[in-house]
Amino acid sequence: MPWPYHLRCFNCHTQYPTQTTNYRCEKCGGLLEVSFQILGRKTPWKNRGLSVWKYRELLPIDNERFVTTLAEGGTGLHHCRRLSREIGLKRLFVKNEGENPTGSFKDRGMTVALSKARELGKRKVVCASTGNTAASLAAYSARAGLKCIVIVPEGKVAASKMLQVMIHGASIFQVSGDFDEAMRAVVTLTERRKGFYLMNSLNPFRLEGQKTLAFEVCDQLDGGTPDALVLPVGNGGNISAIWKGFTEFQTLGVTKTRPRMIGIQAEYASPIAKAVKRKQDRIQPVTNPRTIASAIRIGSPVNWTKVLPAINESRGTAETVSDKEILRAQRDLASKEGIFVEPASAASIAGLRKSREAGRVDRSDLVVCVTTGHGLKDPSVADHLPHHESYALKITQPDWIERLERML
Ligand code: F0G
């Protein structure tokens, strides 16, 4: 059983019951969040293996029988020595979320949101997506036997993500336009038809699963916290969820500090980074966002009201990166550390490099970069690789081994 919790408005703090299916406050329209009573509690999870459900006391599922899982979380925190040296850092770790069941961090949220959807008696779940949310929702819906509907921007989703959605049997609807149009369609649909349950990061239960990344990082650092946590930002659900996780661990007394949160966006899809840099308290949506990192090609991030306080309270910052910088970072991580991530995820490495050069990250800082999705999700980057020599090997010739050696 979870510790006592309720829903409350992030903006005006009006409280709502635990089985609320709305995601906005009826009074002020603010986003809802889950709030646990945790002060003074003892943590019972020390001897449990690393996973999302290790922290089940802090996950809002009342009845265990509804839990739908594919063994999510427990991803590696990889010490990247070569890249640390190159970037000019003492300690860089990569929390590789591509190791999740469907290859992205979305699975952390989806296991919780899908379990909650079942607990709430929902039969049809729906999301807008740049690909990963759709792939994850499709898989968990298949596992739970729920009807899954995904709405995606036509022609703008990476090939393997579409493959995942198809193989898991979801119904796919394509809208012309960007993710932002797909999102508007989902919001309108779920407002007009209560039978469809919204599974985007506006759903407060989903974010509860995603906060477990913070718990895992602290546990993997033996109760320490990083000085800075760097991650790509699209809608801003993940950065706000992870910040909430760090805050809960600090309130519990498990950790003493919280990291600076550094959000990275692609330069032509960067409403949040712009607002942070200009010290504005609201964002200016971007029309026609562009970037090779299709996962974060988002002009109107739905969670911006949660993101700006997370970055500001943490004394963090935001950075923009170009496609060229993203592709370089992707190759660096793959060729120097053996970790293959999709372009959006590589944005975190590219952004760290820039933040370090600008002096916003110190050499002595312990930094964790979150790589959010697996590299195999987006094969289109092959078109951007520099020429890679491969040689014909004529094994019928007697001296083929000598020839091979000469080529090296
Ligand atoms: N990285 C990847 C690989 C993503 O797929 C996303 C979001 C993000 C980062 C940004 O996370 O939105 O919480 O700030 N993908 C969503 C999707 C939009 O539909 O799959 P965020």
Image (cartoon, rainbow, N blue to C red):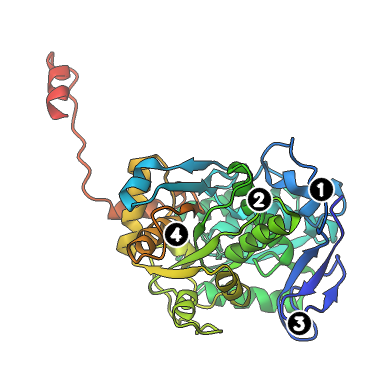
Q: Are marks 4 and 1 in contact (CB under 8 Å)?
A: no
What type is the residue that disc 3 sits on? Answer: Cys
Q: Which mark is residue 42?
A: 1
User: Which image quarter: residue 193?
Assistant: bottom right
| Marks 2/1: CA–CA distance | 15 Å
Question: Which callout, 2 or 1, points at the residue further toward the start of the chain?
Answer: 1
Q: Which mark is residue 344?
A: 4
- Mark in front: 4 vs 2: 2
Q: Are marks 4 and 3 in contact (CB under 8 Å)?
A: no
Q: Which mark is residue 215?
A: 2
Task: Find out if the beta carbon at label 4 lies less than 8 Å from the nearest ligand 1 atom.
Answer: yes
Badge 4: how crowded within 10 Å, few (<14), some, or many (20+)? Answer: many
Badge 2: how crowded within 10 Å, few (<14), some, or many (20+)? Answer: many
- Mark in front: 4 vs 3: 3
Place of residue 256 in the rendered image (x, y in percent of width and height, measured from the top left) = 65, 55
Direction from residue 110 to residue 151 in the image, left or right: left
Question: Which callout, 4 or 1, points at the residue further toward the start of the chain?
Answer: 1
For the C terminus, give its image quadrant.
top left
In percent of the image, x 44 and y 48: which residue is there? 92
What type is the residue that disc 2 sits on? Answer: Phe
Q: Secondary structure at mark 1?
A: loop
Question: Which callout, 4 or 3, points at the residue further toward the start of the chain?
Answer: 3
Direction from residue 276 to residue 25 in the image, left or right: right
| Residue toward you, 313 or 33 | 313
Q: Which residue is mark 3?
A: 12
Above or below — where is 387 with respect to 123? above
What type is the residue that disc 1 sits on? Answer: Lys
Place of residue 375 in the rendered image (x, y in percent of width and height, measured from the top left) = 44, 48
